[in-house]
């Protein structure tokens, strides 16, 4: 309460300052006081404060000059979010409305503007409606403009005003007294007539009629744009609108009209659900293809934008893009263009395979051939837009080609161009990047092209990653500073798709040359991060010499002024940790620790330093000459550093920065290293059993105990991956690899037993996500080194020791990217009403129905890696053992209905001869546990979701209960989340309570 009283006192003080400013004699002080009201109301949105402040402003508006009125109208426009807190609505509106009767046209215009700002609370005032409608016919241009602006605001909130306005716009646009510019602005108001189906129909009929009455270029373009926005707002008449726009694209020769129609098609393709018939019925693709080859550059750009929208990734339209091609006949000009391409051109050889039978493959090839004629013609004369197509057209064509290769082509089985089209597209892309890489003005378009290269490399990594990196590095010395930064970002994103080991030496050489010449000193940190990613130590074949060389190179060329700005310095240290270069991070972090200004940051940096030291000790343990005590001693030192890091991270935690996930990951790593220490000791003890060719009892017991510990660690990793919804794909891939290697290490230890092999099924503990190329390559190479069952104990011990050295100690596991996430990106809250108590029972009667209301909010940042699309609410009812009515559980209505059908189909003898008045009121006497799932979809605006679970106690009609009997049930409600890829995540939301029914 004290904090709230402080806010009220501060708000009242601000009101006094406002009143003082309004009473000032200086006009400037009055204007300054009025302008500051918006900031005060945003900070203190209390109803009393809002009401008092706006009434004071309304008084000033009524009594002062037009300068003051202009400032008041501006403040009212900024305070739209606080208008619903106004108490005296009538008084506020009346003080503004009285100025609309002034003899000054400027004052009337300002009054209309202020009334438009108050449209949310004045939407039902008929007098205001009439004033705005009458002002549309005024002779003063300023007043008409203000009336149109106010009409737009009232149309968006009032269906009555929109209906009255719709009947006036038609006659005003058809008449000769209304100026043309006013007509164009009035036409745009018809896009707001979507309050009802009848009103939308009237507005559409008016617009279609005006297409015939006013066929001039600006009117036709404005009407088509307005029709599109009206259809999108009402979601009615979508197919008719697509047909109308296609008709104007085909028959109207005016470029402005065709551009407006194509803009409308692009808007429809981006925002409406997929309907194949809507796009294929009017020959949409044929018309768009003709425009790409024949139209002017501005029209061709828009045509390609429409095609790009239809084929863009992760959109329902892209899956049927090839079906649309199959349903439409390829234009003769497109087929001829594809066949007339110069066969000496690399692009032509990549795309021309048109078969004479007009198959689907030929139709897709014809479209792609036309696109390649624009971006990579064999000669300037062969380009449909010779001699030089605009760069914007080239960019959108490459984006369309990328969407086809990423979204459409993978869905076409047995396509013959999967090898040639991606290579040709990438070469054409970098050809245009090379032509403009030195032009800073083209940075935005180059960024779009480089994003296409990353998307292509993501879809075709084996074919394109190496080529893309080589071309980008070749262009880097010739790029402007801004474009060089874009090239480095593209290379970094490409390397995260798949590590290109063949380019590491080339990148290292390029970095040294660039720093020696001083041409890229401003981008040192970007180049260094690129080098670290390219030589990521998660690759098991990265030698210690290469890592040492990279560390020495970066430290040697570190800018002298690196201490001036510590943020890029920290980013470089973080990149070293995330890519396994712990020697480099151990050299950089102490410099950061010297410059920290807060205890929290110092503890965080110190913890990272301990973590880096421990991982370096673990990696160096693999290079020790034997598995003796030195290896165990080094692992003990690493464990001590890990525990110190955990203590420092715990001390750095605060309510604002909670490191719970980081501490959980660190605890798992400590357990992992403890198992490593046990295995090192176990292998040393096994050497004593080689001559006997049989493990001793103590060693065999240690093998079983270590295998059990590895199984528990695998399960812990899997649970973490199922619950950490904010974990990115790279972190999941690294944990998946660790889980798989734990299973392989467990199997290798099993081979040491006397049976001569391990019977453990590798499929029983699958890692949560083994969809990455890195995981497959690492696991396959480790499996290849597993000992055979016929080997001697010494040979098996040698093989297990090598696997332990290479894939356990020598893995150099990088620090996960999610380790550096300080804020939770996903928050889910749940509440159940009536509010249950875990200890006390919720009592209801047998005859009454109980409605359980499950509500909650999903809050997700836009950068969250897994966006929640659905929630599954599971209702579980369990009978209490020993309860007299335990055989008859509680049922939700829907589950009871399903249970009736199931039992009757199974010919349950308990109910076969029983009749029921209501089949929903049935319960099997043989059921003790029941689960029912309900699906909820969070709102796209605020993330709110709600599920209502109707519950009643039901029992068989022929069974009777004694008076005063009670039935108690355990009830639990659990929530799991599903993301856009239909992956289920356990978000840890659960509510358990007791329900008691008096029978």
Image (cartoon, rainbow, N blue to C red):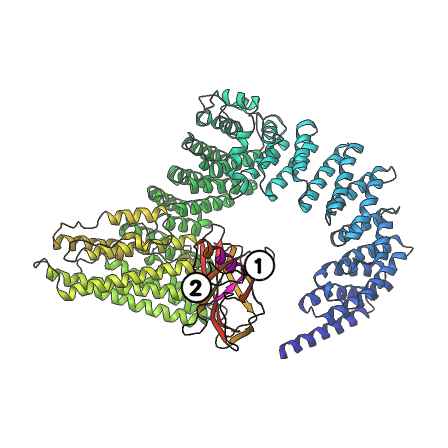
The answer to whether one can see residue 36 in this image is no
Residue 943 image label: 1
Looking at the image, residue 909 sits to the left or right of residue 319; the answer is left
Q: In this picture, is 83 found above or below 548?
A: below
Residue 330 rendering spot, x and y as whole percentages: 55, 25
Whichever of callouts 2 and 1 sits on the residue coming sooner in the sequence is 2
The answer to whether one can see residue 578 in this image is yes
Viewer-proximal residue, 184 or 998? Answer: 998
Looking at the image, residue 363 sits to the left or right of residue 133; the answer is left
Contact between labelled residues 1 and 2, with CB atoms less than 8 Å apart: no
Point out the residue furthest to the left here.
Answer: 691
Q: In this picture, is 281 found above or below 120?
A: above
Q: Helix or strand or loop: what does disc 1 sit on?
A: loop
Give the labeled residue for mark 2.
927
Point out the residue furthest to the bottom here.
Answer: 2
Res 810 quadrant in image: bottom left
Cα distance between the residues tagged 2 and 1: 37 Å
Looking at the image, is mark 2 or mark 1 nearer the viewer?
A: 2
Start-end of magenta stretch: 884-901
Viewer-proximal residue, 444 or 90? Answer: 90
Point out the residue furthest to the front here.
Answer: 913
Looking at the image, residue 476 sits to the left or right of residue 669; the answer is right
Viewer-proximal residue, 699 or 907? Answer: 907
Residue 511 rendering spot, x and y as whole percentages: 38, 46
Looking at the image, residue 986 sits to the left or right of residue 893; the answer is left
Q: Residue at x 46, y 22 (%)?
A: 355
Image quadrant containing the N terminus: bottom right
Q: Is residue 293 magenta?
A: no
- Circle 2: is it few (<14), some (14-19), or many (20+) Cα within 10 Å? some
Res 74 quadrant in image: bottom right
Residue 735 rendering spot, x and y as whole percentages: 36, 56
């Amino acid at each position: 309460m004290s904090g709230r009283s402080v806010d009220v006192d501060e708000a009242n003080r601000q009101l006094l300052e406002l009143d003082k400013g309004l009473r000032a004699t200086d006009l400037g002080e009055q204007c300054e006081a009025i302008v500051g009201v918006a900031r005060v109301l945003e900070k203190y949105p209390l109803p009393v404060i809002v009401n008092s402040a706006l009434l004071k402003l309304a008084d000033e508006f009524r009594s002062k000059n037009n300068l003051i009125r202009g400032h008041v109208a501006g403040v009212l426009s900024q305070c739209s979010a606080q208008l619903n807190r106004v108490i005296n609505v009538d008084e506020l509106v009346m003080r503004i409305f009285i100025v609309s009767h002034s003899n000054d046209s400027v004052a009337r215009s300002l009054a209309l503007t202020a009334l438009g700002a108050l449209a949310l609370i004045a939407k039902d005032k008929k007098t205001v409606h009439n004033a705005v409608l009458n002002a549309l016919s005024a002779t003063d241009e300023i007043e008409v403009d203000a009336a149109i602006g106010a009409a737009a605001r009232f149309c968006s909130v009032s269906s009555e005003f929109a209906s009255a306005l719709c009947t006036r716009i038609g006659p005003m646009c058809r008449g000769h007294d209304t100026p043309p510019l006013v007509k164009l602005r009035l036409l745009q108001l018809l896009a707001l007539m979507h309050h009802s189906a009848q009103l939308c129909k009237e507005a559409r009929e008016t617009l279609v009629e005006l297409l015939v009455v006013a066929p001039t270029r600006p009117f036709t373009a404005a009407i088509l744009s307005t029709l599109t926005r009206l259809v999108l707002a009402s979601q009615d008449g979508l197919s008719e609108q697509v047909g109308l726009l296609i008709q104007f694209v085909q028959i109207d020769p005016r470029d402005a009209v065709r551009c407006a129609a194509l803009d409308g098609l692009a808007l429809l393709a981006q925002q409406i659900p997929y309907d194949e018939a809507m796009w294929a019925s009017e020959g949409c693709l044929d018309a768009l293809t003709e425009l790409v080859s024949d139209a002017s550059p501005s029209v061709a750009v828009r045509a390609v934008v429409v095609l790009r929208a239809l084929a863009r990734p992760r959109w329902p339209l892209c899956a049927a893009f090839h079906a649309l091609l199959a349903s439409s006949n390829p234009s003769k000009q497109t087929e001829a263009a594809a066949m007339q391409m110069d066969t000496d051109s690399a692009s032509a050889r990549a795309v021309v395979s048109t078969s004479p039978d007009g198959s689907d493959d030929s139709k897709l090839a014809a479209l792609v051939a036309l696109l390649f004629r624009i971006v990579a013609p064999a000669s300037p004369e062969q380009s449909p837009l010779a001699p030089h197509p605009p760069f914007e057209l080239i960019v959108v064509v490459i984006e369309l080609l990328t969407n086809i290769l990423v979204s459409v082509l993978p869905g076409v089985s047995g396509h013959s161009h999967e090898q040639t089209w991606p290579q040709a597209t990438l070469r054409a892309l970098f050809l245009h990047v090379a032509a403009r890489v030195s032009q800073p003005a083209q940075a935005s378009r180059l960024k779009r092209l480089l994003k296409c290269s990353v998307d292509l490399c993501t879809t075709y990594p084996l074919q394109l990653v190496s080529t893309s990196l080589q071309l980008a590095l070749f262009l880097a010395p010739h790029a402007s500073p801004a474009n060089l930064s874009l090239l480095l970002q593209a290379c970094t994103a490409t390397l995260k798709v798949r590590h290109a080991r063949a380019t590491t030496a080339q990148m290292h050489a390029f970095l040294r040359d660039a720093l020696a010449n001083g041409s890229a000193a401003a981008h040192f940190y970007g180049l260094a991060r690129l080098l670290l990613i390219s030589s990521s130590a998660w690759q098991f074949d990265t030698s210690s010499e290469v890592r040492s060389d990279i560390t020495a190179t970066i430290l040697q060329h570190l800018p002298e002024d690196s201490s001036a700005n510590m943020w890029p310095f920290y980013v470089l240290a973080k990149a070293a940790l995330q890519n396994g270069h712990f020697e480099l991070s151990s050299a950089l972090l102490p410099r950061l620790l010297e410059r920290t200004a807060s205890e929290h940051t110092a503890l965080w940096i110190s913890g990272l330093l301990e973590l880096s030291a421990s991982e370096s000790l673990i990696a160096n343990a693999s290079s020790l000459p034997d598995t003796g005590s030195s290896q165990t001693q080094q692992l003990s030192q690493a464990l001590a550093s890990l525990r110190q890091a955990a203590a420092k991270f715990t001390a750095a935690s605060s309510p604002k920065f909670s490191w719970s996930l980081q501490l959980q990951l660190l605890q798992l790593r400590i357990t992992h290293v403890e198992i490593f220490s046990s295995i090192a000791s176990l292998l040393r003890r096994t050497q004593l059993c080689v001559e006997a060719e049989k493990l001793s009892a103590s060693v065999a017991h240690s093998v079983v105990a270590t295998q059990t510990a590895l199984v528990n660690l695998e399960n812990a990793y899997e649970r973490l991956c199922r619950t950490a919804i904010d974990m990115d794909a790279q972190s999941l891939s690294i944990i998946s690899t660790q889980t798989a290697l734990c299973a392989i290490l467990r199997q290798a230890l099993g081979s040491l037993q006397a049976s001569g092999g391990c019977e453990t099924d590798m499929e029983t503990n699958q890692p949560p996500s083994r969809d990455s190329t890195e995981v497959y390559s690492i696991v396959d190479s480790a499996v290849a080194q597993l000992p055979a069952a016929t080997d001697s104990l010494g040979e098996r011990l040698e093989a297990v020791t090598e696997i332990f050295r290479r894939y356990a100690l020598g893995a150099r596991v990088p620090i996960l990217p999610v380790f550096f996430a300080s804020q939770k990106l996903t928050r889910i809250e749940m509440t159940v009403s009536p509010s249950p108590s875990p200890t006390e029972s919720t009592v209801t009667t047998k005859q009454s129905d109980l409605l359980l209301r499950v509500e909650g909010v999903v809050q997700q940042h836009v950068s969250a890696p897994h966006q929640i699309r659905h929630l599954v609410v599971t209702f579980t009812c369990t009978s209490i053992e020993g309860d007299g009515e335990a055989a008859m559980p509680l049922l939700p209505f829907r589950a009871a209905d399903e249970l009736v059908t199931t039992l009757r189909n199974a010919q349950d003898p308990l109910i076969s001869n029983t009749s029921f008045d209501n089949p929903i009121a049935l319960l099997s006497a043989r059921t003790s546990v029941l689960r029912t799932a309900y699906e909820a979809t969070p709102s796209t605006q605020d993330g709110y979701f709600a599920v209502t679970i109707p519950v009643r106690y039901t029992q068989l009609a022929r069974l009777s209960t004694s008076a005063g009997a009670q039935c108690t049930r355990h009830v639990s409600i659990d929530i799991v989340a599903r993301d856009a890829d239909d992956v289920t995540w356990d978000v840890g939301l659960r509510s358990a309570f007791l329900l008691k029914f008096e029978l």
